[in-house]
Amino acid sequence: PVLYPNPGQGYITIDQMEGADSRPVRYRIYNSVGSLVKEEVSEGGSEIKLDISDYPAGLYLIVMHSHNGIRTMKYILTR
C-alpha cells in the first residue's frame, strides 16, 4: 500500500495498488506515545480515505490488518 500525502494535514489516502480485492481492512491509528486514537473497518476496495485532521500535529502509526497480514505505516500530521 501507498499512503499519501505524507506529511499532510490529516486527510489521508491509502492506495492498496492494482489487484487489491474488495475485502474490508481493519485499521488502527496510534499517536507517538502509543495510544490508540482511532480504530475502524474500511468498506474495502483499492482506496481507503482516512480523516485525522482534528488530532494534534505529530507522528502517527497506521496499522492495517487484512487477509494479507499486518502492515504498519508512519504518517506525519502537520499544521
Image: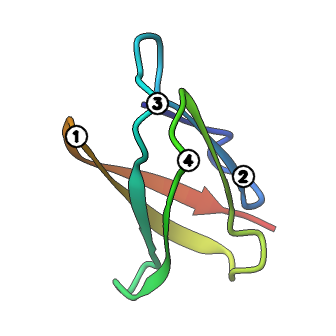
- Name the amino acid, label 4: Glu
In space, the residues marked 4 and 1 are separated at their CA atoms by: 14 Å
Q: Which residue is mark 3?
A: 22
**First in residue order: circle 1 vs circle 3:** 3
Work out which quarter of the rendered image holds the C terminus and state it.
Answer: bottom right
Give the SS element for disc 3. Answer: loop
In space, the residues marked 2 and 4 are separated at their CA atoms by: 23 Å
Residue drawn 77% across the image and 59% down it: 9
* Relative image position of residue 17 (x, y in whole percent): 47, 18
Q: Is residue 44 above or below residue 46?
A: below
Give the SS element for disc 1. Answer: loop
Residue 43's mark?
Answer: 4
In space, the residues marked 4 and 3 are separated at their CA atoms by: 8 Å
User: Where on the picture, by quarter, is residue 3?
Assistant: top right
**First in residue order: circle 4 vs circle 3:** 3
User: Viewed as shown, does residue 13 lie left or right of 61?
Assistant: right
In space, the residues marked 1 and 3 are separated at their CA atoms by: 11 Å
Residue drawn 41% across the image and 21% down it: 20
